[in-house]
Image (cartoon, rainbow, N blue to C red):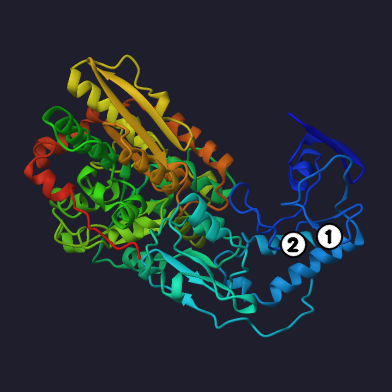
Amino acid sequence: METVELLIDNIPIKVPAGTTILKAAEEAGVHIPTLCYLEDINEIGACRICVVEVEGYSTLAAACVMPVHQGMVVKTNTPAVRASRRMNLELILSDHDSDCPTCIRNGNCELQTLCEELNVRNVRFEGTKKHERILDTSTPALVRDTGKCILCYRCVSVCDHVQGVDAIAAVNRGFETTIAPAFNKGLIDVPCVECGQCILTCPVGALYEKECIDEVWTAIADKEKFTVVQTAPATRVSIGEEFGMEPGDISTGQMVAALRRLGFDAVMDTDFTADLTIMEEGHEFIERLTEGGVLPLITSCSPGWVKYMEHFYPEFIPNMSTCKSPQQMFGALAKTFYAEKIDLDPEKVVSVSIMPCTAKKYEAQRPEMRDSGYQDVDYVLTTRELARMIKEAGIDFKNLPEEDYDDPMGESTGAAVIFGATGGVMEAALRTAYEVITGKTLASVDFHDVRGLEGIKEATVDVDGTEVKVAVAHSLGHARELLERVKAGSQYHFIEIMGCPGGCIGGGGQPIPTDTEIRDARMKGIYEADEAMALRKSHDNPSIKAIYEEYLGKPLGDKSHHLLHTEYTERSQY
């Protein structure tokens, strides 16, 4: 590998040819501030916050895009550099609606952080705002605020390069440029899948989830209502980040305790219906495999992926599992099975879910999701929203004693926990499908080939002499790549697709920041939680056995099909 030698602030450094000044400075232990930069996603030098002096150059260079060369001399802390960075930041601020105290990103805003870092104490420029402020609240999940947008293009890049959706782009030119859907439509009028990855990449408050905190507070306070809350697998390894804990720290017990202190009447676990999903989806796979059904079977628990499929690949509708997501299975059972069990009018049950995903807000409002006779899930709170409620209530989260979920929908297995990571649904399904098909006990329940953050993973599993070929993809860009392989003739029996990078651990409702390192730490926490469980296969869950005996009958039976399965709709790409 060819290397070059250079000086950065008089520090000699040797790096591979083609390395940017920004990455070389990191190697040298020199910090260069950035704003628009996202490694491998948005490297465009738009904000000019990362400018540096390069000996022999007549103008300052953007460190995030300028490659190094042999003998280069770089200075990152000169009067001209500091003045330019501050001026560029002030110019951004001059066109920014700076209502910081009431902004959703107050205290977690990269613009605020830069103002502190660069010692900006006033804005010398007051000019006309470039456009009328638009607050797009058209979708059930996302809010877009043009008054906060700083034209960093991060959201555009992640929607294009990572998700392959292209729901938003630069509209108009010059001073009138704004980031918006085509023809300045609302997000509801374009194929936005409401995954929320744009929120995770936005450095300010220009994109955020549509909150329902006040509605949930109202439901909790209503003595005529019975509030049931469920928590998704991935939330247990991320909620703690909002309270100073490390990514991947398992805080299940504290989260349960916090929810009780918030006033919920019953605190239960989405993992219960993750186990139920495996029973239904596993038997669906077995039926298709053994009786000649449409293959590959493709998982259906990621609502962003489902909506993406409906817009861009509706020809795969016959391949989709008809299983609802665990969230929606839980909602349907909360207002039927559970309401009957505790002798409660289902009209009085308010079903709330805590999800790592913004698209779950959209999913809960799909018209198909009313098989209980009511809207199955009334309110969806993101991990971030739950953290805001806990803080508002003055609860000391880190020091809460650990508590257990309520019965009967609080018991789960390790197979359900790993739903939170890419590959987890596939691994959980294989644990059950293998034993149901063969009648044999797995020597090891760990399927390492489907784990990890590689974009597309493939494996072949020997099921009693039958080679079952499986594939796993996470992020919609990788989903597109995998589906194109299928269309080109690649043969698989079973495919898992998660809409977000890393799966639910990287969902659009998770704490900010969420990057590759943080996703990896959360994933490790997920597998640690799985290994710590007494039961690690969904079909071994005694509460799952009981609900079939008492209420559902059997997997894929009439009652199961009515409450736990759904259908899909072909949608336009435009």
Identify whether 274 is placed above or below 267: above
Quadrant location of residue 112? bottom right
- Secondary element at image label 1: loop
The tag on residue 48 is: 2
25 left or right of 313 in image: right
- Residue type for callout 1: Leu
- Secondary element at image label 2: loop
Q: Position of residue 142 (x, y in %)?
A: 43, 65
46 left or right of 389 in image: right
- Nearest the viewer among 319 and 555 is 319
Disc number lying in front (1 or 2): 1
Q: Name the residue under label 1.
A: 60
**Residue sitting at 42 percent across and 55 percent down?**
195
Would residue 330 be seen by someone viewing this image from the given angle? Answer: no
490 left or right of 322 in image: right
Of marks 1 and 2, which one's residue comes earlier in the chain?
A: 2
422 left or right of 43 in image: left
Quadrant location of residue 298? top left
Q: Position of residue 13 (x, y in %)?
A: 84, 36
- Circle 1 packing at 10 Å, graded few (<14), some (14-19), many (20+), is some
- Nearest the viewer among 351 and 404 is 351
Identify whether 366 is placed above or below 302: below
The tag on residue 194 is: none
Evaluate if marks 1 and 2 touch, with contact meaning CB atoms under 8 Å apart.
Answer: yes
In three-dimensional space, the C-alpha distance between marks 1 and 2, rounded to whole angstroms, equals 9 Å
- Residue type for callout 2: Arg
**Residue sitting at 74 percent across and 65 percent down?**
115
- Nearest the viewer among 525 and 285 is 285
Q: In which quarter of the image is the N terminus?
A: top right
